[in-house]
Image: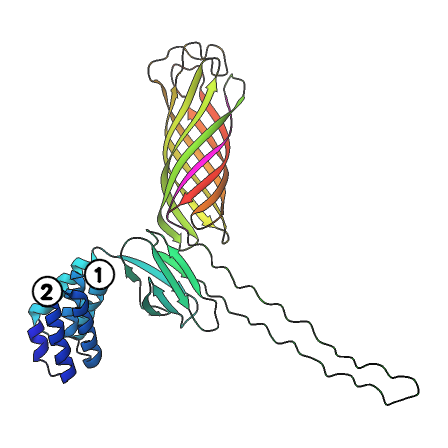
Amino acid sequence: MGAVLTETAAAAPKDDLLKEAAGFERRGDYAHAVGALEQAFTASGDPLIQYDIGRLYERLKRPVEAFAAFSLFLDKATGAPDIYRQDASKRRQEVRRGLVEIEIRCAVAGARVSLDSRVLGQTPLDGPALALPGKHQLHAEKPGYVDFDATLADGDRSVDVKLAERRLTAPSPVSAPVLAPAPAPAPGPAAVVTTSPAAPVAEPATAAFVTPPSAIEVTAGGVFWTAKEATSSVTPGFTIGGRHTVFDITPGRTQLRVGGKLGFTRISDPSPATFWSLLAGAAVRHQLAARFAVHGGIDAGILLLAGLTPDSKLLAPGSVSEVKSPGLLAFEVRPSAGIEYALSSAWALVLGPQVVWNPRPTQFLTYQSLLRFDVSAGASVRF
C-alpha cells in the first residue's frame, strides 16, 4: 500500500514524510513511522494514508486507533483498489472484536469529552465511544461549567455526564459616602460608609458516583427463627454475596442484577449445628441520590443442616428422627430488601431485612416448614 500512496499526486513534503515513514517501518520503529504518516495526512488530507496508519497501529497494539484509521480509509478513500478496501474491512472487523462500546450522554451541548486523554469530540457525540476492556478516566469540560471527572470501572457501558454551571462571586457594591453637614457650632457627624454583604459563593455540584457493575457484600446480623410447634429463638447469622449488573432498566438509575449468596447460622440445642445456605437469584437496584440506593430481590437454593445429631431438638424436643452425613438438605427461598449508602465509588454500607423460608424441610423433621427473619448490616465493595 505504501507504493500506492506515493503514486497519488501530492506535495513534496507529503512524499518526503512517506519516505521517512517507510524507513522507520523497515527498522521496526513503528511509533515514529506512524507519527510521520500522521503528519503526511495532516499536510495533504489524503485518506489513502489511513490504511498504512491503521496497519502500524495494529503493530503497536493500539486497536482503538487502528479501528478509527481503517474506518476513515473505508469512508473517504472510495477510489482505492478493491484489494486494499477488502483487507481494510477485514482488519477493522478483527480489531473491533476486542473493543467495547461506552455510551456517554450529556444534557449540555458543546462540552469537550475525553476518554483516557483521547479527545472524543463535543457533545452530543456521534455515537458510543470505543475502548479496550478495563478501567477508564472520563473528563468533560466547557467554559462556564465545573469540570466533570469520573473513573469508569471495567464493565461500565454507559455514563451520564453532569455538568454544573460555575457561579462566580459578584463584587460587593459600595455605597457612596454620606457627606458631613455644613460646619456648625456643634461638631458635625463623622462621614459614614456602608457596604452591602458579599453574595455567597455557590458550592460546585458534586458529580454522582458512577456505580460499578459488580459488588461483593459481607453482612452480619440477628436471625429470628421459628417453626410450627416450636419455640422461637434469635441467633447470629452471616452472609456473603456477589452481584453483577446484566441490564440497565433505566440507564444510570435502575439496574437488574444477578448473583449468589452463601449464608450460615450457628445454633446449639444442645448439640451444635450449622445452617448453610447456598443461593442464586436476581435483584433490582434503584439509585435514589448520589449516595443512596435501594434494592429488592429474591434468591432460591438449598439449605444444609450440618452437624445435627439425634439429640438435636431444633427448638422442639423430638423434632429430629434420623440424621445421615453430611446432614439434612432442604429447599430455601429468600426474599430481601435493603438500602445502600456509598462511602466512595468502591465502598458502601448496606442494611436490610431478609425473610428465609424452608417449605417442608425434610421428612426427618417433624416441622412442616422453617421460617427465619434476618436483619443484617455490613459493607459492600464494588468493582
Q: Is residue 143 left or right of residue 137?
A: right
Residue 203 appears in which quarter of the rendering?
A: bottom right
As for residue 222 lying within the magenta part, the answer is yes
Q: Which mark is residue 116?
A: none
Q: Residues within 10 Å of mark 1 (few under 14, many from 20)?
A: some
Quarter of the image with the N terminus is bottom left
Residue nearest the observer in this picture, 215 or 105: 215
Residue 148 place in picture, x, y as percent: 43, 63
**Residue indicated by mark 1:** 62
**Residue indicated by mark 2:** 87
Residue 63 place in picture, x, y as percent: 21, 60
Residue 225 place in picture, x, y as percent: 50, 24
What SS does tag 1 mark?
loop
Residue 277 place in picture, x, y as percent: 39, 28
Residue drawn at point x = 42 percent, y = 48 percent: 346
| Magenta span: chief secondary structure | strand
At label 2, the amino acid type is Asp
What SS does tag 2 mark?
helix
Q: Is residue 63 left or right of residue 8?
A: right
- For the question of whether residue 79 can be seen, the reply is no
As for residue 194 lying within the magenta part, the answer is no
Residue 50 appears in which quarter of the rendering?
A: bottom left
Sooner in the amino-acid sequence: mark 2 or mark 1: 1
Marks 2 and 1, how far apart at CA: 18 Å
Mark 2 vs mark 1, foreground winner is 1
At label 1, the amino acid type is Arg
Q: Which residues are magenta?
A: 210-227
